[in-house]
Image (tube, helix red, strand yellow):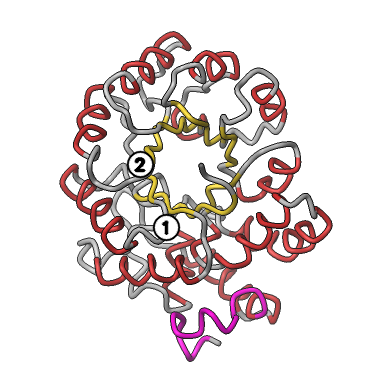
């Protein structure tokens, strides 16, 4: 169902911290124009942890509306409360989303049995396709391959976004699940390796600013043209690393503002704006010809700051 480049979309905000729906509409159009394969709305990069429940729902609904059915929308519906996740999922059942992205419960530190029962309970309360999301550095709990394999037998659990950084997980899961079960990388720096080992896609932070590049890289990987995919990956490798110079989505919002995709780089507390030190590092990178070569193409000239390119 989902292959290639999937963007973990930022949630643009005004200076006062309110969601900027005008910028959100522009971003959705940008990704449609750039051939992005799908959009994750209100995931980690979309600041799901600090949006109110009302905002969370509204951003997803607006993203679906702005997409005009031209691109699939995956809704971030995860919570450390099973029943809160069920409530949001049920609310979105007739919204037009294509699937839900459900993170391993954070802070609670459940056992593998608790993680299994959490996802089973959610899946049993909806017909919407569910994508598991494992990011132990953020959640404090690791969804192990043996638990993923058990969960894959539940009919509407269709895949996993694996962001542990452990590439051995690809084979450890792929060998024991249905061929249709999706393996999606959640780490830009290892995404191509992940796909070369048998993964289907990447949910990418970097795709916020270079969607066409990520699309091309993934498309080459799907066609097993790894030499061409590797060439692009080498070109964007430094940028991928810089996206995590501070907590995501601080750097990606800073660059998105710098190149004119959004009006402000506002993030919600407890996150704060990019530090002066990292501001200098990113500014230095942006002045390099390689970055201008990566970012600019004829398709995106109407979306970027003219003074930038």
Q: Check the image and report above or below for 170 versus 117.
A: below
Question: Farthest residue in the left direction?
Answer: 54
| Label 2 residue SS | strand
CA neighbours of label 2 inside 10 A, class few (<14), some (14 to 19), many (20+): many
Q: Earlier in the sequence, mark 1 or mark 2?
A: 1
Please give the label number shown on residue 71: 1
Question: Farthest residue in the bottom direction?
Answer: 307
Residue 161 x, y percent position in the rendering: 53, 36
CA neighbours of label 1 inside 10 A, class few (<14), some (14 to 19), many (20+): many
Residue 16 x, y percent position in the rendering: 20, 66
Is residue 303 in the magenta section? Answer: yes
Q: Are marks 1 and 2 in contact (CB under 8 Å)?
A: no
Residue 192 x, y percent position in the rendering: 71, 48
Alpha carbon separation for disc pair 1 and 2: 16 Å
Marks 1, 2: nearer the viewer: 1
Query: In the drawing, does residue 309 fall left or right of residue 217?
Result: left
What is the magenta range?
Answer: 293-308
Please give the label number shown on residue 280: none
| Label 1 residue SS | loop
Q: Residue at x 61, y 21 (%)?
A: 177
Point out the image quarter for the C terminus. Answer: bottom right
Q: Residue at x 49, y 55 (%)?
A: 7
Please give the label number shown on residue 76: 2
Is residue 190 in the magenta section? Answer: no
Q: Residue at x 44, y 8 (%)?
A: 113
Q: Check the image and report above or below for 288 versus 5.
A: below
């Amino acid at each position: 169902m989902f292959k290639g480049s999937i963007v973990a979309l930022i949630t643009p905000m005004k200076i006062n911290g309110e969601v900027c729906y005008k910028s959100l509409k522009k971003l959705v159009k940008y990704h449609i124009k750039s051939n992005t394969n799908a959009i994750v709305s209100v995931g980690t990069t979309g600041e799901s942890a600090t949006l109110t429940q009302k905002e969370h729902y509204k951003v997803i609904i607006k993203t679906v509306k702005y997409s005009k059915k031209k691109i699939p929308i995956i809704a971030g519906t995860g919570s450390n409360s099973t029943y809160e996740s069920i409530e949001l999922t049920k609310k979105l059942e007739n919204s037009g989303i294509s699937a839900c992205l459900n993170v391993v419960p954070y802070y609670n530190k459940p056992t593998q049995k608790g993680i299994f029962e959490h996802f089973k309970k959610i899946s049993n309360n909806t017909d919407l396709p569910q994508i598991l999301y494992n990011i132990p550095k953020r959640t404090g709990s690791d969804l192990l391959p043996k638990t993923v394999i058990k969960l894959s037998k539940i009919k509407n659990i269709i895949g996993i976004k694996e962001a542990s950084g452990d590439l051995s997980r690809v084979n450890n899961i792929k060998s024991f699940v249905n061929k249709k079960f999706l393996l999606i990388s959640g780490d830009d720096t290892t995404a191509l390796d992940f796909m070369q080992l048998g993964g289907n896609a990447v949910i990418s932070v970097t795709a916020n600013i270079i969607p066409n590049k990520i699309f091309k890289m993934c498309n080459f990987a799907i066609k097993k043209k790894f030499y061409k995919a590797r060439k692009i990956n080498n070109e964007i490798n430094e940028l991928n690393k810089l996206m995590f110079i501070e907590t995501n989505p601080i750097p990606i919002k800073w660059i998105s503002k710098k190149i004119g995709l959004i009006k402000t780089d506002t993030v919600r507390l407890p996150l704060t704006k990019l530090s002066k030190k990292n501001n200098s590092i990113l500014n230095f990178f942006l002045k390099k010809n390689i970055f201008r070569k990566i970012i600019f193409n004829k398709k995106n000239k109407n979306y970027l700051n003219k003074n930038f390119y």
